[in-house]
Amino acid sequence: MIALYEGTSVKSRMIEWWSWSQFSHASWVKRNGRVVEAWRGGVSEWPTIHHNHTPGTRVIFLDLDLTPEQVERIESFLTSQLGKGYDFLGVNRFLTRSQTPDDPERWFCSELIFAAFLHAGIELLARVEARKVMPVMLFYSPLLREKGGIVTKEAGAISEG
């Protein structure tokens, strides 16, 4: 399941303002509740949606009907990317509209999630390259549907809603 974050930090607010969106970040929530995301320290897996996110951050979930094989392909791809760096230059491409090539060893959040779906044979948005996908664009995919949300608490806390 995809998680989209309505960040509260100055940096998050700038991303939201620049992208005309309420979302500043995207991650993947595995069936076991663990989270894979490309963020500051690179591509990492965390125990909960709350880990590393400011308490009070609103998160919405997007989902679609996936076969077990598609989930396996998405999660296998994401696992294979663990440890790769965060693509600060990729984020800069959004700001500058640069056409510089991607660094295959670095990801930014929504690019990673979009690429994982492409790896599973699922085109969330037609005719869009992964490197051009901002978090809000995932929200606009006609394949995804909103499945509720939460507000983050201290790392390790469990929140429903």
Image (cartoon, rainbow, N blue to C red):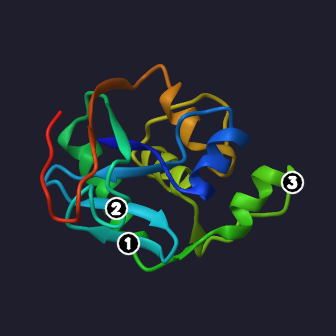
| Residue at horizontal 30 percent and vertical 28 percent from the top | 64
Q: Nearer the viewer, residue 69 or 109?
A: 109
Residue 56, x across and y down, in percent: 34, 48
The residue furthest top is 142
Position of the N terminus by quadrant: top left
Residue 66, x across and y down, in percent: 26, 34
* Residue pointed to by mark 3: 96
Tag 2–tag 1 contact (CB < 8 Å)? yes
Left or right of 76 on screen, residue 130: right
- Disc 1 residue type? Ser
In the rendered image, which quarter is residue 146 located in? top left
Left or right of 113 on screen, residue 152: left
- Disc 3 residue type? Thr
Position of the C terminus by quadrant: top left
* Residue pointed to by mark 2: 36
- CA separation, marks 2 and 1? 6 Å
Label whose residue precedes the other's in the sequence (2 or 3): 2
Q: Residues within 10 Å of mark 1 (few under 14, many from 20)?
A: some
Point out which mark residue 44 bears: 1
Label whose residue precedes the other's in the sequence (2 or 1): 2
Q: Residues within 10 Å of mark 2 (few under 14, many from 20)?
A: many
Nearer mark to the viewer, of 2 and 3: 3
- Disc 2 residue type? Val
Left or right of 113 on screen, residue 100: right
| Residue at horizontal 62 percent and vertical 41 percent from the top | 16
Q: Nearer the viewer, residue 148 or 11?
A: 11
Q: Using the image, determine if residue 147 lies above or below residue 85.
A: above
Q: Residues within 10 Å of mark 3 (few under 14, many from 20)?
A: few
Please tell me whether mark 2 sits on a helix, a strand or a loop.
Answer: strand
